[in-house]
Image: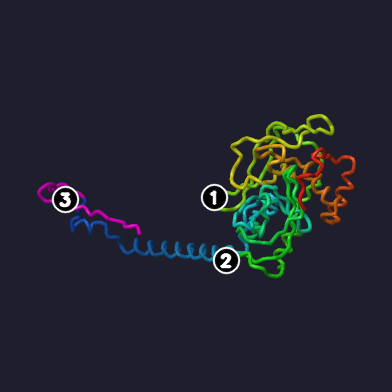
Amino acid sequence: MVLWIAYIPFLIASEDSVEAVLEDYESPQKLFMNIPNAQEVENTQSQSNEAAKVNSSKTDSVQKTKMRPRDIATPVVPQWIYSTAIIETNFSDGSFKKGLGTLLQNGFYLTSSEVVYNGKIMPKAIYVKMQDDMTANLICVSKLQVKSVDLDAGLALLKVSQSVDDFCQLRPQTYYQDRIFKRYGIDVFASHRDIAPYTKVNYPYFDKMFVFVPQSMKIGRVATYYDFDKQKEQGYGFEISTDSYEEYTYGRAFYDDKGGFLGMMSRAGVGYVPVFIERDVVQDFLCNAQENGIIDDNNIKKSCQVLGENRKRFFTDMKGMANFY
């Protein structure tokens, strides 16, 4: 409780002069020196009435144009903000991991393998929370299951298994959830153009108000590994500044100024620190899952066919030894 204490000045007769006491004093005579005549009183009343009419008119106008709650729009942010998810994984031993993920088409989520993999300890439950595009609140959306994990690429693919309410309790799918899946799924195959080092990229940042807001940074030099099959260095992403290792680092997606997907932050099997895993690796990861029968999705199948010769393959010398389904 906050207490406001008022200090009241006291007049001490022994210390204050008569002049100081009478400085702001008005004698009774002064009170009668400026009495207005009848005409002045009438003019003053007339002016007061006119002012009252004007104020009344303004008040009515404000009331008529007062915004209703449904007319108040949320701040304009890139659409990929609403494709961003918080992935929470509970393991069978009671441990817990949390990171970011991205909603893909047809109920798939892409995230970092670091978020769902914990050695021989299996995930017990995986929940996804997303930001409401109407009120900017984070709400629980679905329960997920692991479809594919590639530790070499540092990626994991999840699929919606059950719908939940705002508090992660099981319930039938709602119109709101169906709307999210149809409106905000990201197409990671929309482009296959090369990404240059030191490019400015945009990403979702979880601010102090617990909502996602867009931020930007520059990626660093190319991150490489030695491909023993090709006998040469193979680029798979980009290094990032250690200043960018913030909470929810793993699984964070990156976009260009037009909203195109560029890649995801994770830790590949050949490295020890988080790096920017480029879009080509993500595309190869999804195509591998489709070709190996791990998933059967028409959108991914068609996208891989369209990619054709432009598809780049990564970590082929690992022979898939670090893949889990």
Which of the pair 111/80 is nearer the observer? 111
Q: CA distance from mark 3 to mark 1?
A: 55 Å
Query: Which residue range is magenta in the image?
Result: 1-23
Based on the picture, tell me whether residue 52 belongs to the magenta stretch.
Answer: no
Q: Is residue 314 at least partly visible in the picture?
A: no
Q: Which residue is mark 3?
A: 21
Which of the pair 155/261 is nearer the observer? 155
- Indicate which disc, 2 or 1, sits on the residue closer to the N terminus: 2
Which quadrant of the figure contains the N terminus? bottom left
Q: Which residue is mark 2?
A: 64
Element marked by disc 1: loop
Of all residues, the one furthest to the left in this rendering is: 14
Residue type, label 3: Val
> Disc 2 vs disc 1: which is toward the camera?
1
- Indicate which disc, 2 or 3, sits on the residue closer to the N terminus: 3
Q: Which residue is mark 1?
A: 208
Give the quarter of the image for residue 136.
bottom right
- Indicate which disc, 3 or 1, sits on the residue closer to the N terminus: 3
Q: Is residue 316 at least partly visible in the picture?
A: yes
Q: CA distance from mark 2 to mark 1?
A: 36 Å
